[in-house]
Each structure stands twice: as C-alpha cells, then as structure tokens.
Amino acid sequence: MTTGYQRLCVDSIIPVSSTLVIALALRTVLQLNVVASGIAVVLIYPVAKHLFRSRKALSIAPGPTLWPIIGNVHQIPSEHPWLTYSKWAKTYGDIIHLDAVGQPIIVLNSANIARELLVKRSSIYSGRPHLVMAGDLAGMGQSLALQPYGEEWRRQRKLANQEYNQTAVLRYSHVQEAQARTFVQRFLKNPTSLQSELSLGMAAVILEANFGYVVKSEEDPFYKWALVTMEDFNQASRPGAFLVDFIPQLQYLPEWMPGTGFLQLAKTYRKNMEVATWEPFLWAKDNILKGTARMPSLCATTLLKEEPVSEADEASLVLTAAALFGGSLDTSTSSLLSFFLAMLHYPEVQAKGRAEIDAVIGSGRLPSVSDRASLPYVRSIITEIYRWAPAAPIGIPHALDQDDVYNGIHVPKGSLIIANIWHMLHDPEAYPEPKAFRPERFRGSDAEMQKVTDVAFGFGRRACPGMQMAQGTLFAFAATILATCEIVPMLDAYGKPVVPDIAYTSGVISFPQDVKCMLRPRSPQAKALLEQSLDSV
Ligand code: HEM
C-alpha cells in the first residue's frame, strides 16, 4: 500500500525539472503538425502543470528530482555524503529534502537552521532512526546512542552526564595524562602502528573511566570484545546491507527458510554484544563490592549510590557504558590521527604550539590537563581539528517525532534529520579559506572556539555527552606529544620525507587514511621525564 507521504513524494518534483518537462513538451509540440500539437498540449500541459503545482502545494524543501517510487535513492551518495550535500547547498540551499523509497531525509547545511530545529524544537527533533537489523534483531537499539527519545534514553543520558559532565570528568585527568604518556613511549618504540596505538589509548581511557579497569595491551580481552562489537555494529547498520531494514516483516520468517541467514547473523551479533558489554560490568561489580576496584568510575558511582540498584538499572548502566565506549573510541582516534596529519602538513603550527608549551610550562615537567586554561594556542589547535576534519562529518541522524513546519516548509513526521556538520564548519563566510589549517582564526578566543564545538559535537538534547571527556583526552595527548617530541614524516628508500596525503574515509566516523609518521624526542630530558612519569603510575 502506498502511504499518503509516499504518494506526495512521488508526485512532487523540483521546479527546475518541471520547467524542463514543459520546455521538452513545447519542443515536441513545435515538431508536430497543428492537430497533433493541439492534442499534445491538451495531454502534456496538465501533467507538467500538475507536477509543478503538487510540489508547491506540498511545500517540502528543495532537493534533487524525485523519481517515482524510489525518490532519490539513486542520488543519495554513499561516498563522502557531506561533500555532495555541500555541493547541493549551492543549488538547493541550506535545507534539502530527499526521499529514499518513502523515507523523508532532511539535510541541514546551516548551523542556524540546525539550532532552530534540533535545539529550539528539541522536544520533537530528538528521536533516532529505527534500525531493524542492528537495533531490533542484534539488540543494539537499546543503547543510549540509538534509543528513541523517551524514558529509557533519559535514564541512560542521566548516568552518562553524572560521570562525564564538565566537573566530574576532571576526576579522570590523571588517566588521560597517563595514557598520553604511555602512548608516546609505545609509539617511539613502534612507529608503524599509529592508529592501533591511538585506538588502544582511547579505549584504555574510557574502560578505566567506565569500569575502573586498566587495559595493558591490544590482547586485552575486554578491549578485543569491544572491537568485535563495534565491527558487528558497522556491519549490521551498513545502509542497504540487509533487506529486513526495508521490509521489517522479514524478521518474523522461520529460521529454517532459505535466505534467512541474517537471523542467525543477528543472533551472533547479539551474543557478541552481550559478552562485550556485560563481562566488564560484572568484573567491575565484583571488584567494587570487594572493595578492590580502582575509583572513581561510572560503575562505582552508580553501584555505590545509597538507593538499591535494580536489575533494570544495571541493564541501563551496562548499555550506557557500551554507548560511551562506542561513542568515544573512533571519534577520538580519528581526531588524533587528524592532529598528526595537520602537524605534518603545517610544521609551523606544530612549532608554535610547542613554543607556547615551553613558554608556559618550561621543560622541567610534563603538561597536565589542568594546564588547558593557560595554553590557548594548543586549545586552538585542537578546536581547529574539530573544524578542519570533523570526526563525525554528518553526526548521527536525528528523527522527527511529529509533523513540523519551518519557514513555510513542511517537515514530515518520521523524517531523518542530517546535520551536515562538515559543511557548517567549512562555510567560507564564517571560516575564510576553510581548507587551510589555521588555529589563529580563533584569535585565542574561547567564544570563537565554542562556535566550533557547538557544531562538531552535535545539537540539542542528543548532543555528545562525551564532549568534556574528549576535550581533556585530546588535550592530554596533543600537549604531551608537542612537549616531548617532534612529529616528523617517515623517510622513503632514498631518505626523502613522505608527508601523507590529506584523504579521508567515507564512514559515519571519517578517518584520515594512511597517516604514517615518526616521533623524534626533543631532548634526553623530555625522554627522561616520560620514563619517570610512567614509573610513578
Ligand atoms: C572528538 C571526539 C568526539 C566527537 C567529534 C563526537 C561527536 C559526536 C556527535 C556529532 C554526536 C551526535 C550528536 C547528535 O546526535 O546531534 C555524538 C553523540 C554521542 N557521543 Fe560523541 N563525540 C566525540 C567523543 C565522544 C566521547 C569521548 C564519548 C564518550 C565518553 C562520546 C559519546 C557519545 C554518545 C554516547 C553519543 C550519543 C548521544 C545520544 O544519542 O544521546 N563521544 N558525538
């Protein structure tokens, strides 16, 4: 059955193409004899007029031509969608309407419109898309990042905020500093593994903050399980990978039927997820109750509350911790890879950051997270990373829970709302020469930097709850690296430096590709400080 909305989409068409239809019709008319012309005008004109009028009557936002039934499915880009949406902004403007077989998708290319809708109208714009394979069948839809906007989401969000708000997160500064120092030591020994060492460092920060658990190596079982589940999620949520996402009724087929392998796969994903999320929690609970756990942690704070923690509360806690891990790992790793890439391409920025650290901290100690306030240039470098290469270039889509009208434009209930963060942060009006990495553009002003973080971490009630954690971790890593080492390119077989290209992957979390480089210790004293700092951990 075709829904009213599907019909509207199929019938509607953009003005440009309506004009084209009329022009083509007229050209045909001119080639026909008078009688035939008369018939053609009678037949074609009303159709063209109808197409033109129905779009206006609908008042949906502009966008590429909608095809019958499929809408824009064939035009929705799978590679670097933020770049195509950004290009479309020139033709269609800051709010674009797309349709994927009846599913309305609204792309926002303006931070102001995103604020109008996702922040000011957040009571209706804070849902998430419903994923059948990843969400319902694999069981991942219960976690904070995918929960529909409602009671359970609020419960999980409260747990996340309690532990990772601006003040509470400072209790983890020592973890962030220790991991930054460990990373530098490890990478000095093994300069071929930048991405995996960063990923391990990011995981270690969040697993300690969530569970009081210390990760020592890539072989750590909790770390390995978490990676498996993240990969399962990537597979399960791949757009178009599973028919059941388009035809949800398929989930009720019996498992013995041919073609239902996805049901078995979903069970495997669910089992992996249960191990990855519950095992570290049970470990933490056991240690907290025995009094042997490292403190503080999200689990300790929650379990040691005065009121008893019910089974349902425990389940919410486990899901929150899992979402925080998932939200943290790739975004922070990608941002730090971008830091390395930027420092290789802009050695003068690297030198300036280092000079600021030398001037403020000197060379007698390593930087700590509490130095953030006195290092505005290092803060600017980190902010410029969020802007220059946002780790989540189109964020996570929101879903609209009610029909809405914005500036006369109809935004249908159930629309997916995509904030094109990349475009907003590359607007040449706000950020001249947006492709240049230039921390000076903020003039050391926190208000200017906040304009970037207000966009890069998403909007409204769903905005990133890990922002303060990310800020501290990225600062600890960037400042420790700059204070102790120079970031230098690898050398080729002829001893020539090889600076990696600026190229990014296409996923929801976009990574710079093939960033290879070396760290060169700045002095024997810097090396000694690093070694001493690890002895004291
Ligand atoms: C550079 C680092 C990071 C960036 C750029 C980033 C960006 C984002 C963005 C754009 C969103 C979507 C917001 C929206 O829907 O409007 C998001 C959501 C989320 N982030 Fe982050 N994030 C980062 C680090 C972190 C960290 C460190 C954590 C955990 C400690 C985290 C946990 C989450 C969670 C759980 C959500 C889902 C929130 C919800 O649906 O209510 N993120 N993040």
Image (spheres, helix red, strand yellow):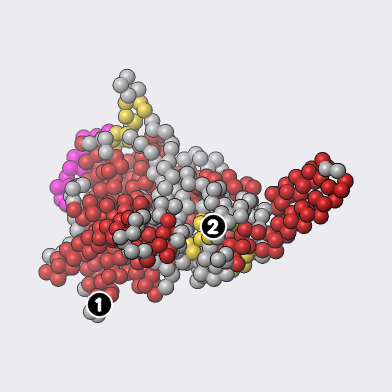
Local SS, label 2? loop
Residue 327 falls in image quadrant? bottom left
- Disc 1 marks a residue whose amino acid type is Ser
Q: Is residue 183 above or below residue 173?
A: above
Mark 1 or mark 2, earlier in chain: 2
Give the residue at x 42% y 48%. 507
Q: Is residue 70 above or below residue 402?
A: above
The percent position of residue 5, horizontal first and vertical second, equals: 59, 65
Give the residue at x 54% y 45%. 84
Q: Quadrant of the N terminus?
A: bottom right
State yes or no: residue 523 in magenta. Answer: yes
Label 1 belongs to which residue? 310
- Disc 2 marks a residue whose amino acid type is Val
Viewer-nearest of labels 1 and 2? 2
Question: Which residue range is magenta in the image?
Answer: 520-537
Near-viewer residue (280 or 328): 280
Label 2 belongs to which residue? 101
Local SS, label 1? loop
Give the residue at x 34% y 69%. 156
* Drawn side of residue 367 relative to residue 342, left or right: left
Main secondary structure of the magenta stretch: helix
The percent position of residue 437, horizontal first and vertical second, equals: 47, 40
Number of marks in picture? 2
